[in-house]
Image: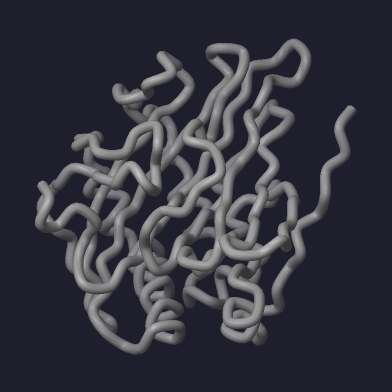
Amino acid sequence: MSNTFSPPWTPLERLASQLSERGFAVLGPADVCRWAGTDAESLRALAADWTGLPPDEYLKDGGRYRQRRHACFVVDGDTVHQTPPRPHWQPVQYNALHGGMQRWFAPMLEHTVAQPAWQALMRAMAGVASELRGRQPWFLEAHQFRIDTTDGIGRPTPEGAHRDGVDLVAVFLVAREGIKGGETRVFEADGPAGQRFTLDEPWSLLLLDDPRMIHESTPIQPLEGQGGHRDTLVLTCRAGGFQGDGVL
């Protein structure tokens, strides 16, 4: 049996300083609620929307293990505006496997994005980005992921260790059922330091100062005699426009 390492929890009061000093921070579920100004019941209610996600039709490795929905928002202060559907696009330098492709994913459900807890997460994310880079409108992309063990193995990050080409990345663990693996690994982009740990508490959160950090999650496998899945919400936050503006 492989060892698992507990997350290096960041007290909410040290969130800004931890991001500044180390380039990443990890919040426990209670601190996520405090950070976003919401409650655990409201976050748990969002989790039902991960059931029945449509398949990701763009996996170049031929896998069937990933399902997802996607949506885009502009957050300016307390105002959260959802934009019309648009493709997700990354340059090859940030995603060697799927970069350079216009990927049209199924849109997130209206019910999901209308929830007060969802709006609270958007504002909290933009607030952290403004602390790091200065207050301005922020362009957020949201991805609901389910990685399952249909193929015997599921790959949360088939592109490998990577940056996303944005200012701030948030990875929320929504659920983890009947699996082993799925270890989170973060590394300095320009240095030797790195850390590995496993997020296993629903609505725990990894925040990354993306220009400074590389990250990945290791493959998942089913526990003996079970199928399983790992659900995450990934938010990316970028200044000046969505990635791909001027290209698409």
201 left or right, relative to 213: right
- Image point 68% across, 22% down: which residue? 221
- Image point 36% across, 75% down: which residue? 126
Q: Residue 41: give x, y in percent of width and height.
A: 54, 59
Q: Residue 131: give x, y in percent of width and height.
A: 44, 86
- Image point 50% across, 69% down: which residue? 209
Please identify the quarter of the rendering in which residue 216 is found: top right
Task: Reply above or below: 70 against 41.
Answer: above
18 left or right, relative to 124: right
Quadrant containing the N terminus in the rendered view: top right
Task: Reply above or below: 175 against 177.
Answer: below
- The residue nearer to you, when weighing 85 against 29, is 85
Q: Residue 114: give x, y in percent of width and height.
A: 26, 58
- Image point 40% across, 57% down: which residue? 235
15 left or right, relative to 2: left
The colour scheme is one colour
Residue 49 shows up from this direction: no
Q: Residue 155: give x, y in percent of width and height.
A: 55, 29
Task: Reply above or below: 233 against 180.
Answer: below
98 left or right, relative to 151: left
Task: Reply above or below: 145 against 166.
Answer: above
Residue 164 shows up from this direction: yes
The count of marks equals: 0
